[in-house]
């Protein structure tokens, strides 16, 4: 039935990234494909296209044993359980253990750029702990260290255009922003590939940009001057809290700025092109393609 192709399993399959990976696998006629999710009802359209949809809850190891059965290659998309300290890492460890128990041959994991113990990013320990667990497990693995999504810039830069100022505590640090689409293409390609060893890849855009670079790009796109205003970290956190974010969330966001200022997100790699055969999208091109969302609610003079 499966023409000798490995059975590919995607976790977190009803999320933005997971759904896109499923689409790409179907387009590539990879498979058979299993989609694992806490919300199987959200994937009825994929079920109709031949995807096997299974219930999986990373807080319930028993559900993972059932969900992962028969999978040859498995994509673990990092979960969004960041509200309770330690919960996300425990979920990921459950998934790694279940993959080994199910006899999965290769695990692909969506990690974060430079997540080592010295990273100031508050979410980094979850990724570092998961990578450590993979290193100690039996299956082969591909760790995809995704840089910061270019998609997150749409909201930030929309505000910057409205204010004429881009506020950040990132100093002169540069970031190799990558689109979620390129992350999905890289993940689908790594999952469907025949690679069976162990590798860690930096998934980045084609260039590293500073906040001043971003300000220049949106100034050109909007026709309005946007100036980068560097802030002290504490000021940035206070501004976000004043804007309605809970303190821990504001501190988590701000921790990325510390890492950017330290140059931790500036590495540019060609992994996306090597995996997919296509170059990743430049930030300027991404913003131009989403100009409507970027300029939403803004009166352009």
Image (cartoon, rainbow, N blue to C red):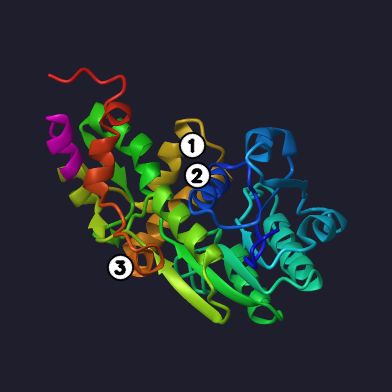
Task: Say whether disc 3 or disc 2 marks the residue closer to the N-terminus.
Answer: 2
Foreground tag (3 vs 1)? 3
Q: CA distance from mark 2 to mark 1?
A: 6 Å
> Residue 2: x and y, percent?
67, 60
Residue 272 belongs to magenta span: no
Per the rendering, the mark at residue 241 is 1
For the point 41% across and 38% down, which residue is it?
239
**Element under disc 3:** loop
Using the rendered view, name the quadrant where residue 268 is placed.
bottom left
126 on left or right of 59: left
On the question of residue 121 being in view, the answer is: no
Task: Return the residue at label 3.
Answer: 268
Q: Residue at x 47, y 53 (%)?
A: 184
Residue 144 in the image, given as x and y percentages of width and height: 49, 66
Figure quadrant of the N terminus: bottom right
Write down the region rendered in magenta.
217-227
As drawn, the label of residue 250 is 2
Q: Earlier in the sequence, mark 2 or mark 1?
A: 1
Q: Quadrant of the C terminus?
A: top left
221 magenta-colored: yes
Q: Nearer the viewer, residue 295 or 38?
A: 38
CB of mark 2 within 8 Å of CB of mark 1? yes
**Separation of disc 3 and disc 1 at Cα?**
32 Å
Name which of mark 3 and mark 1 comes first in the sequence.
1
Q: Is residue 59 left or right of residue 28?
A: right
């Amino acid at each position: 039935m499966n023409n000798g192709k490995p059975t590919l399993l995607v976790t977190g399959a009803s999320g933005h990234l997971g759904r896109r990976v499923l689409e790409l696998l179907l387009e590539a006629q990879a498979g058979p494909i299993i989609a694992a999710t806490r919300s199987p009802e959200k994937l009825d359209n994929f079920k109709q296209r031949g995807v096997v949809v299974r219930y999986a809850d990373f807080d319930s190891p028993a559900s993972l044993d059932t969900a992962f059965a028969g999978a040859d290659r498995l994509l673990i998309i990092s979960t969004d359980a960041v509200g309770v300290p330690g919960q996300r890492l425990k979920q990921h460890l459950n998934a790694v253990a279940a993959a080994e128990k199910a006899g999965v041959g290769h695990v692909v994991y969506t990690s974060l750029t430079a997540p080592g113990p010295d990273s100031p990013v508050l979410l980094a320990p979850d990724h570092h702990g998961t990578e450590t667990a993979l290193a100690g497990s039996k299956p082969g693995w591909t760790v995809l260290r995704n840089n910061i999504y270019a998609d997150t810039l749409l909201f930030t830069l929309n505000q910057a255009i409205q204010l004429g100022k881009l506020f950040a505590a990132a100093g002169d640090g540069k970031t190799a922003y990558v689109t979620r689409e390129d992350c999905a293409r890289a993940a689908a390609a790594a999952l469907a590939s025949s690679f069976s060893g162990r590798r860690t890849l930096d998934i980045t855009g084609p260039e590293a940009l500073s906040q001043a670079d971003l300000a220049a790009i949106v100034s050109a796109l909007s026709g309005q001057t946007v100036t980068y205003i560097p802030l002290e970290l504490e000021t940035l956190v206070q501004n976000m809290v004043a804007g309605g974010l809970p303190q821990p969330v504001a501190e988590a966001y701000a921790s990325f700025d510390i890492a950017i200022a330290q140059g931790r997100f500036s590495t540019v790699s060609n992994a996306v092109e090597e995996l997919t055969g296509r170059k990743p999208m430049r930030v300027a091109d991404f913003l131009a393609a989403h100009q409507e969302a970027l300029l939403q609610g803004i009166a352009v003079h």
